[in-house]
Amino acid sequence: MNNIIKILILAVIGGLIGYITNVIAIKLIFRPINPIKIPILNIEIIGLIPKRKVEIATNIGTIIEDQFLSVDEIIDDMITHKDKQDIIDYIKVKINLMLNEKMTLIPSTIRSLAQNYISEIIEEEIREAIDDVSEEIISKAKSRINIKEIVENKINELDLYELESIILQIVKNELKHIEILGFILGLFIGVIQGIITIFI
């Protein structure tokens, strides 16, 4: 009976050590946010994320741009065929209204022929012009938009406390699992240690 109690005590102690160790390890990812200098040992203690914030921001920006969100994907559907047709139709309506207002003295047959002819010209010429303009806009947008830089700047602009809060919101459950796993492993090691102490 004493042996079982001894094993249980060692198991609980091992579990607590494992749990506390993992909690401290997780905290050290973020804290201390401001560096703490230890003069005698000549070392500086700072959390992993505060220390490598710039590098982390660069890596996240690169991953998002390369793997998740490219400029081409965003811009390629920016001006669709339907958008171009909507512009052409709008111009046609406006010109037809203008012709009707300005050509009131001209017979309706001639006016209708003129409108049809102008509509054909608009369909051909304006479509080509819109294609040229949209290509130029897309080309300029691609050269100006830098997703990696945008993401990197946004992360670097974040206060370290804000960044910590965001990361914790995202991985809260996973970190809790790591803490529990530390307790389970510590418990298991404590049982093994108790068995070894008693029987060896």
Image (tube, rainbow, N blue to C red):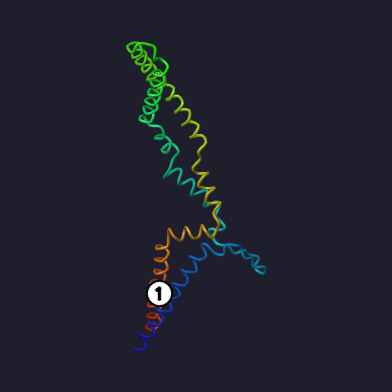
Q: Is residue 21 above or below residue 124?
A: below
Image quarter of residue 174: bottom left
Q: Residue furthest bottom?
A: 2
| In this picture, residue 55 sits left or right of residue 68 | right
Q: Nearer the viewer, residue 82 or 105?
A: 105
Of residues 46 and 165, the one nearer the viewer is 165
Examine the image and state in which quarter residue 173 appears.
Answer: bottom left
Q: Looking at this rendering, what residue extends furthest in the right direction?
A: 39
Per the image, label 1 sits on a secondary structure element best described as: helix
Q: How many marks?
A: 1
Vertical position of residue 4 compared to residue 163: above or below: below
Q: Horizontal placement of 164 versus 11: left or right?
A: right
Q: Residue furthest left?
A: 109
Above or below, comparing residue 157 to residue 103 in the picture: below
Q: Quadrant of the N terminus?
A: bottom left
Residue drawn where x is 37% and y is 74% of the image: 188
Q: x, y (%) of residue 103?
A: 40, 14
Residue 111 position in % (x across, y down): 36, 13
Assign the C terminus to one quadrant of the image.
Answer: bottom left
Which residue occupies 39% across, 35% down?
Answer: 77
Residue 46: where, in percent of width, then height?
Answer: 58, 62
Name the residue carrying label 1: 189
Percent x, y of residue 125: 41, 18
Please give the name of the residue rendered at 41% of the width and 19% of the height, measured from the top-left corner: 101
Number of residues whose C-alpha sits closer than 10 Å to that of mark 1, classed few (under 14), some (14–19) or many (20 or more) = some
* Amino acid found under the numbered disc labelled 1: Ile
Q: Height in image: 155 above or below 30?
A: above
